[in-house]
Image (spheres, helix red, strand yellow):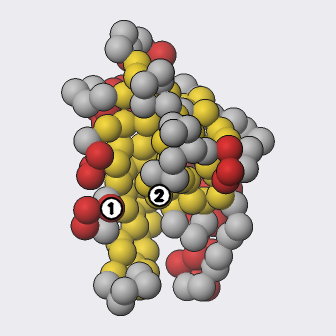
Amino acid sequence: MKILVVFLVALAIFGTQSHGYEVYNIISPTDNGGPIQETMTIDNEKNTAVINIHAGSCSSTTIFDYKHGYIASRVFSRKACYILKMNHKAIPALDQLKRYIFERQALNNMFSDKYIWVKYNPLQSLITNVDWFLFGSPIRQLCEHIPLYKGELAEKIHDTGAGDCAKTGLLGILGISICSDLHI
């Protein structure tokens, strides 16, 4: 009986850790002195990470859906969603994201040079016929009733055109700049 109790306690402890949510919260100062709050919620069961940046008009939500292989960013000031096929060479694995955010919290000054530039063409990349099954339910919940644009990785900053960029992702850890690719 004691062995069964020990087994059930161990199962409860390790089971909730592997199937539960992990929430990380960081508050950072901005250049103008105001705070930015970033919250990363990891759902181990769905294999997703949801990053919320609370920064007034520059607020955004980004979902890393490792199960379906897509990243979606909703930039609230633009009333649009941007979706990108996950490139596993450029995007760290979920456990590495956890390590980055843990180190950032522990050290409070960690900075990574990992930065991803995503370009989209607003005239050519609007997705009108969406297959939500392909993208998964977390991305559907984020982007369903607003314009959805397909993005692609840009090799360098000068590959983008008009310079109209929005910052999403994990600021200072894994930044994502979504830039319009209009060459005027």
- How many badges with numbers are in the image? 2
Vertical position of residue 14 compared to residue 39: above or below: above
Observer-nearest of 165 and 29: 165
Q: Residue furthest bottom?
A: 33
Marks 1/2: CA–CA distance: 8 Å
33 displayed left or right of 110 = left
**Does residue 73 show up?**
yes
173 displayed left or right of 37 = right
Give how far across and how far down residue 104 sits, in percent: 58, 76
Vertical position of residue 168 compared to residue 173: above or below: above
Dot 1 or dot 2, earlier in sequence? 1
Vertical position of residue 59 compared to residue 105: above or below: above
Q: Which mark is residue 58?
A: 1
Q: Which mark is residue 167?
A: 2
Residue at image location 35% in from the left, 14% down from the top:
128
Please tell me whether mark 2 sits on a helix, a strand or a loop: strand
**Does residue 11 show up?**
no
Q: Which mark is residue 86?
A: none
175 displayed left or right of 78 = right
Mark 1 touches mark 2? (CB < 8 Å)? yes
